[in-house]
Image: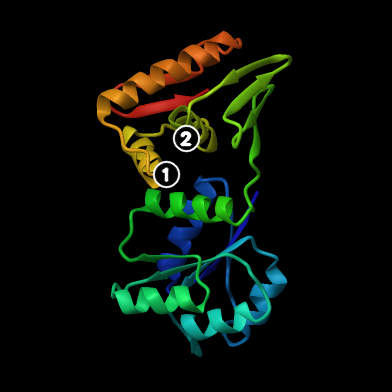
Amino acid sequence: MKKIMIVEDDETISYELAKLLENNHFQPILLQDYQNALAEILDSACDLILLDMNIPFTSGEVLLQELRKQSNIPVIMVTSRNSEIDEALSMSYGADDYITKPYNPHILILRIKAVLKRTGVISPILSYKDAIVHMQKGMIKKDQIEITLTKNEMIIFSCLLQHQDRIVTRDELMVALWSHEEFMNDNTLTVNISRLRTKLRNIGYEDAIDTRKGMGYILR
């Protein structure tokens, strides 16, 4: 389980973030000592940091600059500021991404996963039941049987897999596809889901993707 450090002094927001992360299979860590923030971050061995710009004793930008002198831990700036200048400065200081409040929780989770994947923290090889999922090859292997997925099918399957045993809405799947610059309409999504079901059935996974009418899909 990947560890995410939350650097946010608003207790309500930080606990909401922690709950969101837990629900998406991350381990949240709340920064406690803002006077020694850099040391606590480095000691935490976290995999990614959600860093607010407005924090006690210093600023998010200054802390990021100090952190970059010692570590390349991925950082997503989370802030209420929405100017292009603030975003540009954050990226120039070494931020890996930037998101403004109020944000869509699903978008934040997708951005976290995208940064972890881009920085090499998320493994390109996953598992589903007794099968191996090769993300970069677009392939699922069970015993000696292999099925090849299209790029869109793999994006959909990985999104369902990462949220296994909970309903994933059609909007979430669309956002995941858009984040990979794969644009499709509602009908095309339905076709891709159908093809993915057929391919999973071909390697012995009957009814792997369950439709919840008016809600979305769940991977069993």
Which residue corresponds to mark 1?
180
> As rendered, which of 217 and 195 lies closer to the eye?
195
Q: Say which amino acid is labelled 2.
A: Ile
Pick whichever of labels 2 and 1 is earlier in the sequence: 2
Q: Is residue 38 above or below residue 152?
A: below
Q: Say which amino acid is labelled 1.
A: His
Q: From where the camera sits, is residue 194 visible?
A: yes
Residue at 65 percent of width and 63 percent of height: 46
Residue at 60 percent of width and 26 percent of height: 139
Residue 211 screen position, x and y as percent: 38, 20
User: Are the residues flagged by discs 2 and 1 in contact, CB closer than 8 Å?
Assistant: yes
Q: Is residue 8 above or below residue 182?
A: below
Q: Is residue 21 above or below residue 211?
A: below
Tag shown at residue 2: none
- Crowd rating for badge 1 (residues with CA inside 10 Å; few <14, some 14–19, many 20+): few
Q: Is residue 195 above or below residue 28?
A: above
Asked where in the image residue 145 lies, by quadrant, the reply is top right
Q: Horizontal placement of 48 versus 77: left or right?
A: right
Residue 16 screen position, x and y as percent: 43, 59
> As rendered, which of 183 and 142 lies closer to the eye?
183
Residue 156 screen position, x and y as percent: 45, 31
Measured in 3D between alpha carbons, the distance from the residue under mark 2 to the one under mark 1, in whole angstroms, is: 8 Å
Label 1 SS: loop
Q: Identify the residue at the far bottom of this view.
A: 57
Residue at 43 percent of width and 19 percent of height: 210
Label 2 SS: helix
Tag shown at residue 155: 2
> As rendered, which of 219 and 148 lies closer to the eye?
148
Residue 164 screen position, x and y as percent: 52, 32
